[in-house]
Image: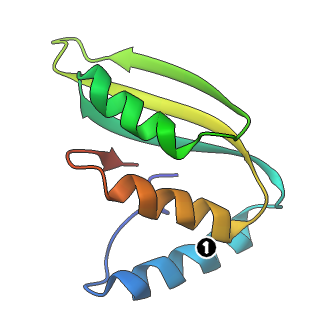
C-alpha cells in the first residue's frame, strides 16, 4: 500500500487525482480498506484520527514503537468508493503530525 501513498507531485490535486486512478485500478469498491497512520504516542492524536471515522464501520488496531515514541494506527474500514478513501485521507492530512502510509 505504501506505493499508493507516495507524493511525487508538487500539486496536491495532481496527487489525489493520481491516487484515485490507482485506487480504482487496484480495488473493487465497495470493500474493506486498510488505512495506516503513524503518530507520536499521544492519545489525543489518535482520538483526532478516530473522529474522522465517526459513524463508519471500522476495526482499529494500534501498536507502539519499541521506544514508545510513536504509535502505528491501522483502521480497517468499509468504504464505498475511491472518493470516500480520498476524503478520509484529506481529513486526516489536516491533523498535525500524522504520517499516512
SS label for mark 1:
helix
Question: Depth check: 35 or 1 in front?
Answer: 35
Instruction: Pinpoint residue 63: horizontal percent, then vertical percent.
Output: 39, 17
Residue pictured at 40% horizontal, 29% vertical = 47
Colouring chosen for the image of the structure = rainbow
Task: State the image quarter where residue 75 is shown.
Answer: top right
Instruction: Pinpoint residue 66: horizontal percent, then vertical percent.
Output: 22, 11
Residue pictured at 43% horizontal, 30% vertical = 73
Q: In this view, does 50 lie to the left or right of 43?
A: right
Residue pictured at 70% horizontal, 41% vertical = 56
| Position above or below: 70 against 35 | above
Residue pictured at 20% horizontal, 45% vertical = 97
- The crowding category of the residue bearing disc 1, from other C-alpha atoms within 10 Å (few below 14, some 14 to 19, many at least 20), is some
What count of labels does the image hold?
1
Instruction: Pinpoint residue 4: horizontal percent, then vertical percent.
Output: 50, 63
| Position above or below: 62 against 94 | above
Instruction: Pinpoint residue 23: horizontal percent, then vertical percent.
Output: 65, 68
Q: Is residue 41 left or right of residue 53?
A: left
Task: State the image quarter where residue 72 is shown.
Answer: top left
* Residue identified by numbered label 1: 22
Amino acid at each position: 500500500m505504501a506505493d499508493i501513498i507516495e507524493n511525487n507531485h508538487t500539486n496536491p490535486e495532481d496527487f489525489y487525482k493520481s491516487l484515485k486512478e490507482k485506487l480504482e485500478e487496484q480495488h473493487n469498491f465497495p470493500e474493506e480498506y486498510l488505512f495506516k497512520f503513524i503518530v507520536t504516542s499521544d492519545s489525543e492524536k489518535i482520538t483526532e484520527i478516530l473522529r474522522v471515522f465517526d459513524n463508519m464501520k471500522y476495526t482499529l488496531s494500534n501498536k507502539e514503537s519499541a521506544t514508545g515514541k510513536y504509535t502505528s494506527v491501522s483502521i480497517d474500514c468499509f468504504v464505498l468508493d475511491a472518493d470516500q478513501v480520498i476524503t478520509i485521507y484529506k481529513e486526516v492530512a489536516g491533523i498535525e503530525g500524522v504520517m499516512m502510509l
